[in-house]
Image (cartoon, coloured by chain):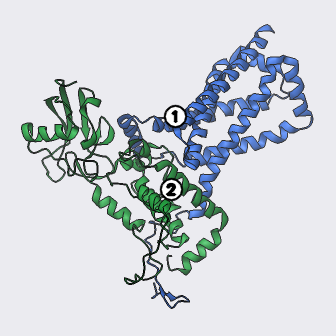
Amino acid sequence: MDGGETDEKGLVMVTLPVQRARRTAFTLPPRVLALLDISLSISGAALSLFMIMHLGLLLTILFGEGTLDELAGFLERYYLLQAGAPFVVLLLIAHVFLAARRTPSSFQRQWTLIQHLGRTRHPDTWTWAFQILSGVALLAIASIHLWVVLTDLPIEADKSGLRIFREYLWLYIPFVVLVESHMTFGVYRLAVKWFGTARGKTHVVLGIWTALLLSLGIAVLISFYRVGSDL
Amino acid sequence: MPDRELRFRVFRHNPFDPESTPRMVQFQLTETPRMTLFTALTRIREELEPSLQFDIVCRAAVCGSCAILVNGKPRLACRTRIETLPNDITLMPLPFFKLVADLSVDTGQWFRDMGTRVQSWINAREPFDPNAEEARMSNETAAEIYELDRCIECGCCVAACGAAQMNPEYLGAAGMLRIARFLADPRDGRPEAAVFDVVSTEEGIFGCIGLAACEDYCPKDLPLTSRLAYLRRKTALLALRKSSQVEESTVADGYA
């Protein structure tokens, strides 16, 4: 550091040296870290929006198989589904990688976290641990779901109904529950991290919202099961 | 409800004694009216085990030295009333910090290191002139600084934080609050690049995963999550907007 520079009043400007974070040539630059953190939140928010839209489309089954088939046919005829699906898959993969870097990777750190969870029993810390475990489960279930549906186009209510009635019901029950809860805790954490929202109020709003999504999701599942069982 | 028979399971270990091994020791006390954990610990030391080590100074939640894990949760012994606790009470030293002995940990060294890392002092724009009139500040600004300056350095936020347990270099909510305190101070003239350099790291704001345990266990009820969120937004905006300028000024100011 030099002796400082003189400003227009003739006063000497002094800047003190700042001790930098311990960093090597291979440490990520600050800007990348910021972008990774933003990307995790944005990918999560985008996937949440997609899931709400997805549920919105599925709700048509409640008005009958014909309505769903018409809508699915429309999306496929204009290649909206074929064009959109790769984006969703890429978004999902990006979200998995971005979230994975926040999870404890070494066994030592996992053990530290487990001990901390058991010791302090702090609810928000438990929901974060749930996010890690449900994230892993969702990656597996969503992969199966995407493969089964996208390799068997076009989407038809009868086909989906049969699939759920015959073999996949035990996959889709945890799928619906895990998706909704993972989404809720994710949105909650996003609100706390970026906006520091009043957590008590957020609990209530998100609780009602999740109960609504969960009941709609289960209603859709029951409708598909009925369609399958009637065939 | 006085007259309860209280069972204290207390962690005991002296890392400076080669013979010592970490162990839990049980003590029994009868509850007295308006008993605090401070009273209980003092009675254990005076009546049952004179060698028990723990830190207590002010008894009024001001000095921050009596923070311990009470049934796993970080709390100040002096302001924890026994009537709020069950009959079985487990006492452990705060994790994360260096153990001195039994329930006593060295938070001072960590806070001093944190203070150096975040430059916990006014970075004056100009040399101090003792004859000049003091610069004025609005009441709102002064109140905001006072609010952020209420931290008593007890270490509860760091001991409660899952991210800190997994990353010993993490600055913790106490460190972030300190940075926010100097950002709010108009007398402080540190360049944005210097703040960015300390905050926009895995040890800084991007080490935080938003568990909010810091706020839940802060005995002074400091607005930690809102200030952490403020720092995160500010840092992210800086990163998005003018990363090139920040990097240039970092080098030009001799911070590299």
Q: Which image quarter: residue A180?
A: top right
Q: Position of residue B19 (x, y in %)?
A: 12, 47
Residue flagged by tag 2: what amino acid is it? Ile
Q: Position of residue A169 (x, y in %)?
A: 67, 18
Identify the secondary structure beneath mark 1: helix
Q: Using the image as rendered, state which of residue B182 and residue B97 is in the foreground.
A: B182
Q: Colour of chain B?
A: green
Disc 1 chain ID: A
Residue found 9% across the figure and 40% down from its top: B49
Q: Cα distance, mark 2 to mark 1?
A: 22 Å
Q: In screen coordinates, is A63 left or right of B151?
A: right
Q: Colour of chain A?
A: blue
Q: Position of residue A203 (x, y in %)?
A: 55, 33
Location of residue B130 with respect to A100 vertically, above or below? below
Location of residue A98 with respect to A138 vertically, above or below? below
Quarter placement of the N terminus of chain A: bottom left
Quarter placement of the C terminus of chain A: top right
Q: Which image quarter: residue B75?
A: top left
Callout 2 crowding tier (Cα within 10 Å): few <14, some 14–19, many ≥20: many
Residue flagged by tag 1: what amino acid is it? Phe
Which label sits on residue B205?
A: 2
Disc 2 chain ID: B
Q: Can the viewer see residue B17? A: yes
Q: Are marks 2 and 1 in contact (CB under 8 Å)?
A: no
Between label 2 and label 1, give the one nearer the viewer: 2
The residue to which callout 1 is attached is: A130
Residue found 56% across the figure and 42% down from its top: A189
Residue found 51% across the figure and 38% down from its top: A128
